[in-house]
Amino acid sequence: MHSRRGLCWLVAALLSMEASANERCLSAADTDLERLYCEVISEGGGAGLPSQPDFNRNDPQVQALLLKRPAQRLGLKVPKPTRSQNEQSALTPQAAERSEPRQEQQTQSEPEPKTELAGCRLNGKRIRCSQGDYRLAENQRKSALEEGVLEPDNQLRLEPFEGSLEDEGAVIPYLSRAYDQYIPKMLRIGLGANTMSFTAFHNAFHTLEGGGVDFSDRMAETYELLKQDRQQLGVKTRYHDDLPDNLSLCDFINRDVLVCDNVGTNWVYVRADR
């Protein structure tokens, strides 16, 4: 009886601490993006995000980019970047006039994923969009691969990262570009069911670079090893039967490729008529 009462007290205390931490976070938030940061953290989706003070020091455009994938996984919408009251009041009228068109232009150049997927419907192994159907990519037999894809000329060449590992405002855009190269390259050698999620990609980057290993070099080496394995070893079509729950987990890599992930599992969908 006493142990049960003690356990209830401990649970209540932990919940109280969690609520208090969320309240402190919200009290330091001036904008919708900063409040969304608090919501993502409270929902347990903050892996890879900087601390709140560091996040708040970033430009709104960078904040939106940092929150893009974590918010998608939680089914949360990323609001349009706006300046905090403190930042807005610090701008001169001339500076404010210059900043507005630039902010509007940047927002329009990168549509939110939910807008891009508004006309799409998820149906298990198929995503149907107005521009075409996308089918779940599975691992392919060696005989089904394009001629020459396992030869030395087909390489994964990512640009080296130049910057501070502590600067997620630089890390995230770099990894987004690298990931957009990585997924098509894995599809090309028939390993669509063996891809890393963006979270795993992000973690691998920090593990390697933090240990003094160049991420781009290691990815290139790994790709060569995968090609060698494909020359000699067979692969299963899929390693599980799980499928994504909803389109909030998905994003376009390019017009022909969609990627969905729930952090632990990755799914790649390829346009059927490409």
Image (cartoon, rainbow, N blue to C red):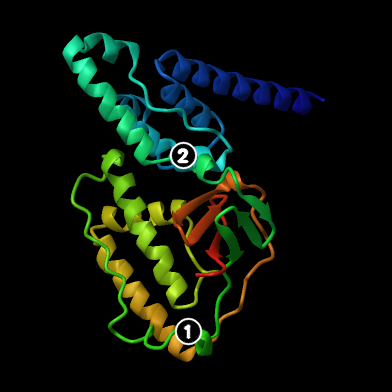
Residue situated in front as seen by the camera: 134 or 149: 134
- Please tell me which residue is depicted at 65% across the width and 24% down the height of the picture: 10
Question: Looking at the rendering, which quadrant does residue 118 occupy?
Answer: top right
Question: Looking at the rendering, which quadrant does residue 132 occupy?
Answer: bottom right
From mark 1 to mark 2, how far is it between C-alphas? 34 Å
Q: Which residue is mark 1?
A: 145
Relative to 5, 138 lies left or right: left
Residue situated in front as seen by the camera: 45 or 99: 99
Relative to 153, 176 lies left or right: right
Numbered disc 2: secondary structure = loop
Question: Looking at the rendering, which quadrant does residue 204 occupy?
Answer: bottom left
- Please tell me which residue is depicted at 30% across the width and 68% down the height of the picture: 218
Q: Which disc is residue 268 wearing?
A: none
Q: Is residue 148 above or below residue 3?
A: below
Q: Residue furthest front?
A: 130
Q: Position of residue 210 (x, y in %)?
A: 28, 52
Q: Residues within 10 Å of mark 1 (few under 14, many from 20)?
A: some
First along the sequence among labels 1 and 2: 2
Q: Which residue is mark 2?
A: 112
Numbered disc 1: secondary structure = loop
- Please tell me which residue is depicted at 65% across the width and 50% down the height of the picture: 121
| Badge 1 amino acid | Leu
Callouts 1 and 2 close, C-beta under 8 Å: no
Q: Is residue 24 above or below residue 164?
A: above
Residue situated in front as seen by the camera: 102 or 88: 102
